[in-house]
């Protein structure tokens, strides 16, 4: 497995809509390696999600950790994801991004979503997600459309560097 280079904000690949994948491509050895490399890269840089365009691959794939806390994180690949909000409730919550290092900001997202995608074998699956995991898949799916979390911020006064986030904001905001 390889650790991939992560594109940072300003690189045009982050602003380009990624293309959909077909099942044959998904099952190819090259694509399976890409999934494994993206998981390794996400873990190496302590991210909770990583999307294709962030590693210079313009394809509709992201990987995301679907459990937080002390359990070993399960990293799930999502291919051609489609998100449908359940209800209209939105919540503000902290986000960061491996393509915008060392910054945190508060972003409104749908509280509850259903995500449909293909798994790494090309089989359809569906997840019903609320709160933080719902936030993660919305953030990652945005990457596939060339959208960064800065674009979603309503109030830029929440922006903070990571060090100051840890010092002044992290504990208070734990849900
Ligand atoms: Zn991101």
Image (cartoon, rainbow, N blue to C red):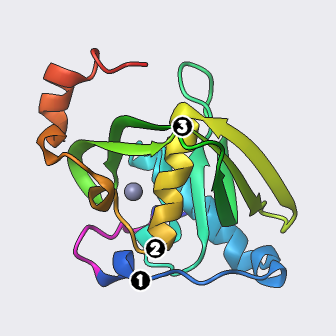
Cα distance between the residues tagged 1 and 3: 26 Å
Residue 35 sits above or below residue 56 on the image: above
Q: Which numbered dot is residue 16?
A: 1
Point out the tag, 1 or 2, that comes first from the N-terminus.
1
- How far is disc 3 from disc 2 in space, using C-alphas? 25 Å
Q: Quadrant of ligand 1?
A: bottom left
User: Relative to 102, is 123 on the left or the right?
Assistant: right
Q: Position of residue 76 (x, y in %)?
A: 67, 49
Q: Is there a contact, CB below 8 Å, between mark 1 and mark 2? A: yes
Q: Secondary structure at mark 1?
A: loop
Residue 114 versus residue 83 in the image, above or below: above
Residues at marks 3 and 2 touching, judged by CB atoms closer than 8 Å? no
Q: Is residue 142 above or below residue 42?
A: below
Q: Earlier in the sequence, mark 3 or mark 2?
A: 2
Q: Is 64 above or below relative to 10?
A: above
Instruction: Say whether residue 164 is magenta.
Output: no
Q: Residue at x 16, y 43 (%)?
A: 159
Q: Residue at x 24, y 52 (%)?
A: 101
Q: Quadrant of residue 6?
A: bottom left
Q: Which residues are magenta?
A: 4-11
**Mark 1 or mark 2: which is in front?**
1
- The disc placed on residue 154 is none
**Residue depicted at x 67% and y 56%:** 77
Give me the disc on residue 53: 2
């Amino acid at each position: 497995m390889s650790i991939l280079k992560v594109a940072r904000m300003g690189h045009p690949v982050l602003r380009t809509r990624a293309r959909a994948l077909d099942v044959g491509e998904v099952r190819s050895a090259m694509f399976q390696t890409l999934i494994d490399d993206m998981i390794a890269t996400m873990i190496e840089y302590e991210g909770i999600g990583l999307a294709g365009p962030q590693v210079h691959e313009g394809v509709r794939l992201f990987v995301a950790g679907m459990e937080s806390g002390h359990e070993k994180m399960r990293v799930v690949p999502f291919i051609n994801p489609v998100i449908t909000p359940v209800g209209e409730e939105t919540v503000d919550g902290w986000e960061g991004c491996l393509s915008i290092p060392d910054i945190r900001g508060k972003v409104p997202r749908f509280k509850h979503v259903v995500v449909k995608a293909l798994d790494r074998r090309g089989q359809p699956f569906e997840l019903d997600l609320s709160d933080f995991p719902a936030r993660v898949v919305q953030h990652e799916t945005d990457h596939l459309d060339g959208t960064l979390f800065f674009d979603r911020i309503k109030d830029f006064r929440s922006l903070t560097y990571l060090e100051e986030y840890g010092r002044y904001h992290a504990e208070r905001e734990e849900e």
